[in-house]
Image: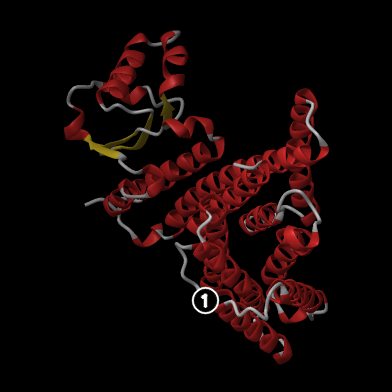
Amino acid sequence: MPAAVIADSFVSLAAFLGLLVLRGSLARDRSPLNRRFLFGIDVLNIMLLSRILAWTTGVGFFGQMTEAAGGFVPLAALVLTEGLMRRHAPKPLKWIAAAGAAIVLISAFFNPQWMGQIRVYILIGLQLVIFISLGAWVIARDRRLLTAAENLMVDRLSLSLVLIVPFALTDFRDVLFIAPVRLSGIAILFLCWLALSYSRANLTHWEIARSFALTAAAGVSAGLVASSLAGLDGHTTIQITAIMVSATLLAQIYNERKMLYRDEERESMLRYLADGPDKSPETFLRGLQTHPSVTGALVLWEGDLKDFDDSLIHAFDGSPVRKKTASAPADRRGDTERSQQLDWFFEKYDATHAMLVSRQPLVLVALNMPTLAASPGAELELAAVQRFAALMFDTGRVR
């Protein structure tokens, strides 16, 4: 397989996987704006997967699918931008996007002889006109017509146009001879990163751009060093560097999604606390057992703790939330019996954390959450849950 095909396929595959990560993040919320996002992601995924199959199998149908999907990319970008701006795009722009998509779709499958390379130039012109026009429309918008959050999202995603416009031209390497590797996949990965970063409103645009630049610089450096060691020519060096950058960005996007998922879990725990006042203590604890942040929490009442004596309760005198890794060293210097009781509690219930909810009546919660130890923020929220539950029992709302 030629080196150019390997490099192009890897960059496109990385972009495809990055879009799948983003799609999984957006698919849980079927809001009108997210549906527009998903439409655009699906169009891009069809284009990326089709061209990978076209390059690796040589089947003509996949090449036709690639061109047809490429014609819908500007239309998908316009539909998404309309949703972000909460208003219709200028009618001439709509007609150009729709007519261009239809022309490319029809010509890709019927392939009339007189078209020749004209279809490719139509696709180039269509993408340039739509992307540049959308960029101008976004820049010239009246920011007062959108909320601060909406302006933030528009600003974040419009940053991707900085890479999309020039990098999209490299997809037409056979006609324009711009670069030895198709770089649109890297622009798509940048778009995925920006879309995921929207939830981090505390980060400025420059901080996100700087993070991207540092990540890309790491990939470029690794590619240059590898190429230098192997004594590769300039063409292959660019291809290796593009592969390194794509792999690095994909890993960062995956890690960003995992971090956002943890943040969402913690936020949902706080939301559960906010909804707590209308619940009885028992209902609150039953709901806690099914909460995604503490799934499988075991609520133990006095009758369930007959194997333990009062030393177990006194083990919580220093803190109502105890961690398995911290129990032994802290207690064995003082009361060995308390330490043994607490250790036996962790072992019996296969728990990593224990939470004292109430002394009268006696209520303990056993949790098996190994990842909690590596997240100080989550431990703080667990302490807040304990405090909230304890206050509910202290007010006497127990049957």
Relative horizontal placement of residue 230, taking residue 62 as reference (left or right): right
Q: Residues within 10 Å of mark 1 (few under 14, many from 20)?
A: few
What percent of the width, then of the height, locates residue 355? 37, 34
**Foreground pick, 73 / 287:** 73
Query: With 49 as the anchor, is 296 left or right in this view?
Result: left
Q: Answer with the quarter of the image where residue 279 lies.
A: bottom left
Residue at image position (57%, 70%) is: 69
Q: Residue at x 74, y 31 (%)?
A: 222
Q: Is residue 104 above or below residue 28?
A: below
Residue 162, how many percent across, how many down? 79, 61
Secondary element at image label 1: helix
Q: Position of residue 230 (x, y in %)?
A: 75, 25
The residue at which mark 1 appears reads as: 32
Report whether residue 159 is seen.
no
Q: Is residue 259 above or below residue 69?
A: above
Kind of residue at badge 1: Pro
Nearer-the-camera pick, 149 or 197: 197
**Total numbered labels placed on residues in the image:** 1
Q: Residue 368: x and y, percent?
A: 35, 32
Image vertical order of residue 189 relative to residue 338, above or below: below
Q: Which of the 4 quarters of the picture holds residue 346?
A: top left
At 60% from the left and 69% from the top, the residue drawn is 67
Q: Is residue 163 visible?
A: yes
**Left or right of 83 on screen, residue 331:** left
> Looking at the image, which residue sits at the far front?
113
Q: How is the image coloured?
A: secondary structure
Report the quarter where the N terminus lies.
Answer: top right
Tell me which residue sits at (53%, 60%) in the image: 50
Vertical comparison of 359 with 12: above or below: above
In depth, the one of 143 and 3 nearer the eye is: 3
